[in-house]
Image (cartoon, helix red, strand yellow):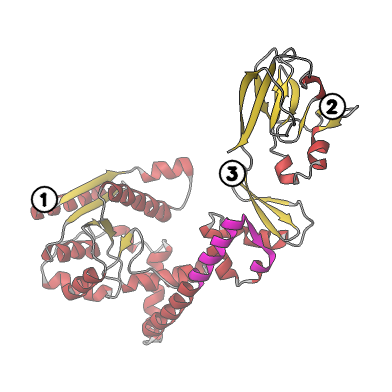
Amino acid sequence: MISTVEKFLKKHPAQHYVLACSAGIDSMVLLDLFHRLSKSVSVLHVNFGLRGQESLQDAAFVSDRCQQLGIHCYNKKVNLRAKLREQGGNLQQEARNIRYAYLHEILQQKPGSVGVTAHHADDQLENFWLHIIRGSGLSGLSGMEERSPLVARPLLSRSRSSILNYARKNGIDWREDQSNDDTRYLRNFLRKKAMPMLNKAHPSLKRELKFLMQKLKETHRSNLKIAAKLAQSWVKRQKIAHKDLLWDESILIEALKKCNIEPRFLTAIQALQHLRPGKQLRVNKRLVLIQSRNGVLFIDETTALRIRFTQSAVHQLPGSFEAWTWYLNPGQVQEKLELDAYQQNEKMRPNGLKSEKSINAILKAARIPKHDRQHWPVMRCNDEIVGIPGIALAHKFRANSSGTHFVKICFSKW
């Protein structure tokens, strides 16, 4: 057992290791192994308060053992049931999220450190069946990696029985979590009932599943490489080319994840490409996908179009004018100038025209795409529209060529 961990750490070295310890047999064996190898170690324990006094005893057990070994122990207490009553969610999933968030917090304080968990080979098989039942894709079915950006799993190749044998041989104490025997939880049902029955009926099942998971992992790794290139292309071009949506769904799902788009939107995105240009799909608070003739556009509403301006007094007009620099009649600028969104029915008379036109029509005539028109600002002075930056200045606010004082406005995108 110790040689397994020693080889693993040579392959995945770190300056410091933060061990996640629950007080159960797996994590206490993990702690013993790292201590025997004289590694720089600290321990993390989260008390979710799910079992009252027993949860407190678990926390005290881990802390006492760390004190005996001269190892620092980070303890966090969370009232998980109260949290679930307020926010809802799955108990086991929420506990996992809290535990990993706390681990990430500790690792941020220790540069060069890595988290370590005691996941083993039987956990891999349990996860496989859980993901089968939940309809997961390759990411779930291929199993946990022995090393991820946040966590190392040095016991992933060892069985639960080998960990038990090590604990007994080396006199390691641990605490039993009685909730692990509650078969109302799906994982416990699989561990206690379903998997033993399957293994008894088909003795080679474990070996065959490990072989299958390895093949799935190889396929998943290959898919991740393709997905990374796709996502990089999408971000660079700010669109998903229609031809890219012909890739296998498992690849597209991973590419969407890398763009911070939830996989559940894949079907809607595939349908969007068949609709007329301009149709939209909002995927989160900031990102909208819009169908165009040659792809699905990414429109980040927080950065779609940002314009700022500077204002100064000048005494001379230039020989020629351009849309991003205005010269205003100071007699009309009696209030503060500001940029603002326009309303659908608002109109203005552009300089050089004899009648008013709607703001939307002016932008459309300037060939501004529909998704940009929605966010293009206007400049106002006391509720009157001075103009549309980069597009048109209102006739009323134009500079008088016979004047000697002017207000110069310079716009810039950022």
* Residue holding disc 2: 349
**Furthest residue to the front?**
319
The image position of residue 154, as x and y in percent, is 26, 69
Magenta-highlighted residues? 223-244
Residue 198, above or below 311: below
For this rendering, which residue is in front, 130 or 57? 130
Q: Is residue 45 above or below residue 168?
A: above
The residue under label 2 is which amino acid type? Arg
Would you name the residue on which mark 3 appears?
A: 285
Q: CA distance from mark 2 to mark 1?
A: 79 Å
Choose the circle earlier in sequence order: 2 or 3.
3
Amino acid bearing label 3? Lys
Q: Quadrant of the N terminus?
A: bottom left
Q: Amino acid at mark 1?
A: Gln
Disc assigned to residue 67 = 1
Q: Does the magenta-highlighted stretch encompass residue 235?
A: yes
Mark 1 or mark 3: name the one nearer the start of the chain: 1
**SS at badge 3:** loop
Q: Secondary structure at mark 2?
A: loop
Which label sits in the foreground, 1 or 3?
Answer: 3
